[in-house]
Image (tube, helix red, strand yellow):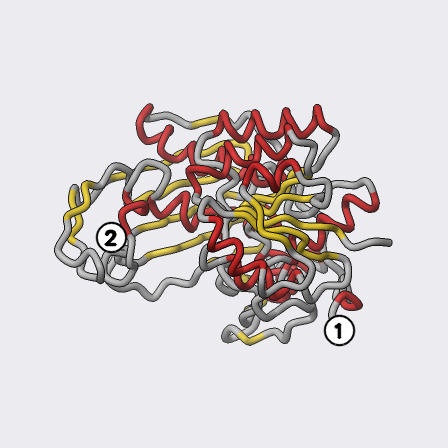
Amino acid sequence: MHPLRIGIIGVGNISGIYIKNLTSFRSTTISAVADIDLSRAEAVAGQIEGAEALTPEGLLASANVDLVLNLTIPNAHGPVAIAAAKAGKHVYNEKPLSIRLEDAEALLAEAKKAGTLVGGAPDTFLGGGIQTCRALIEEGAIGEPIAANAFMLCRGHEGWHPNPDFYYAVGGGPMLDMGPYYITALVNLIGGIRRVSGSTRITFPTRTITSKPKHGQTINVETPTHISGTMDFDNGAIGHITTSFDVFANDMPNIVIYGSAGSLIVPDPNGFGGEPLIKRAGEQEFRPVPLTHGFSENARGVGVLDMAYAIRGNKKPRASGELAHHVLEVMHAFEKSSTLEKHIHLTTHTEKPEAMAPDTYADELD
């Protein structure tokens, strides 16, 4: 079976780890790279055996590309992916699937029409840390999940990021930026979400950049920077999430799942590994659990690898467009709930993705 031929659009910082991993897997190969700056694409293509540098339009038209890996800026995720689906390509978007729900809906509709698959980051939930937690929950280690808490709290990006403006513009903010990791992990561990409520605020109307090269410039904040919401899961569990760019310090865990017979502290969903901690009924303190699953290092791209198998087997990928669309609606629903001052009943639905076995794709690595 020939490897899945991948064309990358957008060769910014995140492309490096994708290229490293996707050229290491047996079932994937990079056949083309594109960027709005063709010279950047040429520089990257020169480091990948067999890859050609193209314009984005040329890549979409190429007969040597099976799947478009869309690593453009978030505002372009939807339009570029829709164009890829219209060109008859499978597509995998970096997170979020798009910043607009209507673009996500149009993308899935175009892919269905073309008979192609859509996938979307994050794929960190396929890593050893969260998949070990998934196995613990499914074997009943903490009983039935009844509640969850998730926290992503920091002071924002203007103190260290060279170009922090986007994080405070429409389409940015802590929820669309980091929420995909947390909510995707929660859906993987507990299941789909049926109803959402939320409260949001813009704590600081302006931000002053202290990083270079824009030191001293002022950013007008256009999107909520502190979002707190409640999620009612299909199985009856109740979850709470807070994402914030307004918090100077905190000591909260990333994710905790509370079960009827114990509690589980889940590793950082922004990574692939980490150390799960469990405390069961009758135990005095949390104890670490060794990882039982692979891909515990930076395995960004394993979601694309999983898509290669899904395409080959004519089945739904784990990091599917349906899952990413559901997560996107959840994230938007928090602000919608805050604005309308009512619960939001979701229109999308998703099941838990298929769990990974401890040795899934173990033979893909040299």
Q: Position of residue 324 (x, y in %)?
A: 57, 40
Give the residue pinned by disc 1.
366
Say which element carries label 2: loop
Q: Position of residue 260 (x, y in %)?
A: 59, 55
Question: Foreground: 228 or 220?
Answer: 220
Locate residue 111 relative to residue 148 in the image: left or right: right
Q: Residue at x 53, y 62 (%)?
A: 16
Q: Residue at x 15, y 53 (%)?
A: 208
| 261 to 187, vertically: above or below | below
Question: Foreground: 114 or 198?
Answer: 114
Does residue 96 appear in this view? yes
Give the residue pinned by disc 2.
246
Say which element carries label 1: loop
Asked if the residue under mark 1 is in contact with the one under mark 2, i.e. CB atoms within 8 Å, the reply is no
User: What quarter of the picture does the C terminus occupy?
Assistant: bottom right
**Amino acid type of the residue tagged 1 in the rendering:** Asp
**Amino acid type of the residue tagged 2 in the rendering:** Asp
Crowd tier of the residue under label 2, counting other residues whose Cα lies within 10 Å: few below 14, some 14–19, many 20 or above: some
Locate residue 360 relative to residue 323 in the image: left or right: right
